[in-house]
């Protein structure tokens, strides 16, 4: 690897050239890195500096449209006659523009707490969430959660579906709400199906005996049991094992359907894999869905019950790839002995990428914006704005990253950060070591135009006010990025469309050419 250019090491490692599509949402054209083959990240950082967050909401629409198309293909291949419902699990990213985009692309709504239902209620009142969508309410439900569900139903939203997680929930909800309810039950995993390395999901749901009690409790009432929730795990990593476990859930559904004729939805849960985290990603979505449909079809035929409408809850898959963080190298410290170099980022990795600490083996796609012709080096990244020894990536036991020979001012893009990262770290708060939130650029589709909105980074006064300090004299930004000199010829055309600091419509043209068209690349 000595003296080998980064571009050569990258090509050898991933089998893709330095020009064109890298994966389904990253491309490189004319030595410039693009998100969704639309957004010129080099030009964005030249205009706005770093650290910088870029959120490209049309990518969310694309993700939803892809999954719906794959489901249609699987239905045709398998001959499955049941429907398919795409629900967005809002806990992955609650940002208003994200939720609104997902709804606009046809997604139904999945909640996990009282606040989710309150947001959904408001979106429905505003006309953003149509009345013909389902709202699936999962998780353990305290009185506030149940009250929010009841209020939504009493207000006239008929398609809210509380998924009963314990029997007390059912009694409380029926006492709160006299209007007819659509209800679901979530199965509780048998001990043999619990992942020993991730046992947290075992606490959810009802045993078979408890589900029988729900059926009996609802008999001769105006309420209807309509959904069987068979969430297998948080992530579908082993499709064969997943389908084996789901086959048992399909049997349970079919037997329950014989007792409850109103049952019509089979929710196979979330955890759909996404290409957002690894350039080595491979997954046969159509094959996976086709196998699921064939399993359900054969099971229902064996029990002489109708094929249900499938429900999938897609969180990470929906939003992970629409966001990118661009961070700047502040200092390079040479490794000692044979250890890789330390690349100190003007930010905090544990604040910006909390999954790196929480999820064992969590990966992110990390690519340099430029310098691909520089010699490749093994490095570890560390946050410069904290004094925490845990603020580094990759984590212990993982191999170092391969990046071009690092230098202060180098820009590095972190992909796959659109799901959970800001929800776990919190938005608008005071973070570890008072690390400020970076500038955000939000790009949305508005009919035939793209609309850009800028959200300024946090400053010291805002952070100190959150902590209760008198801060009249503390209005300077915590960190002002120093922008490296940029050749005007590189950025003049793309930035012509970004001169407005707030909002500006940008024309939408033909399919993207190579870099150089201001109408398509920013």
Image: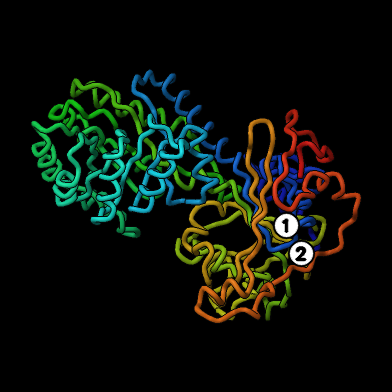
Disc number placed over residue 265 in the picture, else none: none
Q: Quadrant of residue 203?
A: bottom left
Q: What residue lies at 44% left-to-right and 25% top-to-bottom? A: 74
Pick whichever of labels 1 and 2 is earlier in the sequence: 1
Front residue (pair 369, 490): 490
- The local crowd at label 2, few if under 14, some if 14 to 19, many if 20 or more residues have their Cα within 10 Å, is many
Which element is circle 2 on? loop
> Which residue is labeled 1 in the image?
368
Q: Is residue 172 left or right of residue 318?
A: left
> Which residue is labeled 2 in the image?
410
Q: Position of residue 60 (x, y in %)?
A: 55, 40
- The local crowd at label 1, few if under 14, some if 14 to 19, many if 20 or more residues have their Cα within 10 Å, is many
In the image, residue 255 above or below residue 418: above
Q: Position of residue 446 (x, y in %)?
A: 63, 36
Residue 145 in view (yes/no): yes
Q: Position of residue 354 (x, y in %)?
A: 51, 64
User: How many numbered dots are placed on residues in this image?
Assistant: 2
In the image, residue 392 above or below residue 231: below
Q: What residue lies at 20% left-to-right and 42% top-to-bottom? A: 177
Circles 1, 2 touching at the beta carbon (< 8 Å): yes
């Amino acid at each position: 690897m000595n003296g080998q250019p980064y571009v050569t090491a990258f090509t050898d490692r991933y089998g893709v050239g330095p020009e064109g599509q890298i994966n389904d949402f990253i491309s490189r054209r004319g030595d410039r890195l693009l998100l969704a083959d639309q957004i010129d990240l080099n030009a964005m950082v030249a205009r706005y500096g770093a650290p910088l967050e870029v959120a490209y909401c049309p990518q969310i629409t694309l993700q939803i449209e892809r999954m719906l198309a794959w489901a249609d293909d699987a239905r045709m291949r398998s001959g499955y006659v049941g429907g398919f419902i795409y629900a967005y699990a809002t806990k992955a990213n609650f940002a208003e523009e994200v939720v609104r985009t997902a709804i606009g692309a046809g997604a139904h709504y999945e909640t996990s707490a009282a606040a989710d239902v309150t947001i959904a209620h408001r979106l429905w009142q505003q006309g953003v969430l149509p009345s013909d969508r389902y709202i699936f309410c999962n998780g353990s439900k305290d009185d506030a959660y149940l009250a929010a569900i009841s209020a939504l139903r009493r207000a006239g939203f008929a398609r809210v579906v509380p998924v009963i997680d314990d029997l007390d929930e059912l009694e409380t909800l029926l006492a709160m709400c006299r209007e007819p309810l659509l209800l679901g039950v979530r199965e509780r995993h048998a001990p043999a199906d619990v992942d020993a390395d991730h046992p947290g999901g075992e606490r959810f749901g009802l045993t078979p005996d408890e589900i029988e009690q729900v059926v009996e409790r609802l008999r001769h009432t105006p309420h209807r049991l309509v959904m069987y929730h068979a969430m297998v795990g948080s992530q579908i990593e082993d499709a064969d094992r997943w389908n084996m476990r789901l086959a048992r859930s399909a049997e349970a559904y079919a037997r329950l359907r014989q007792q409850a004729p109103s049952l019509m939805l089979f929710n196979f849960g979330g955890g759909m894999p996404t290409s957002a985290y690894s350039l080595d990603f491979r997954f046969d979505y159509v094959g996976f869905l086709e196998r699921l449909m064939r399993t359900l079809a054969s099971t229902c035929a064996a029990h002489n019950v109708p094929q249900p409408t499938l429900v999938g809850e897609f969180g990470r898959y929906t939003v992970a790839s629409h966001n990118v963080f661009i961070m700047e190298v502040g200092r390079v410290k040479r490794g000692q002995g044979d250890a890789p170099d330390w690349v100190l980022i003007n930010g905090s990795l544990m604040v910006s990428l909390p999954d790196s600490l929480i999820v064992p083996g969590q990966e992110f796609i990390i690519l340099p914006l430029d310098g691909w012709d520089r010699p490749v080096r093994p490095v570890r990244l560390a946050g410069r704005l904290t004094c925490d020894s845990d603020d580094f990536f990759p984590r212990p036991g993982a191999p170092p990253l391969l990046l071009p020979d690092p230098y202060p001012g180098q820009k590095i893009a972190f992909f796959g950060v659109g799901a959970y990262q800001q929800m776990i770290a919190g938005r608008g708060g005071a973070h570890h070591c008072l690390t400020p939130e970076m500038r955000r650029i939000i790009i949305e589709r508005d009919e035939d135009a793209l609309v850009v909105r800028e959200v300024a980074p946090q400053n010291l006064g805002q952070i100190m006010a959150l902590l209760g300090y008198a801060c009249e004299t503390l209005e300077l930004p915590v960190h002002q990025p120093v922008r490296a000199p940029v050749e005007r010829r590189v950025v003049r055309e793309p930035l012509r469309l970004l001169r407005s600091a707030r909002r500006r419509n940008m024309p939408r043209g033909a399919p993207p050419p190579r870099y150089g068209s201001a109408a398509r690349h920013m």
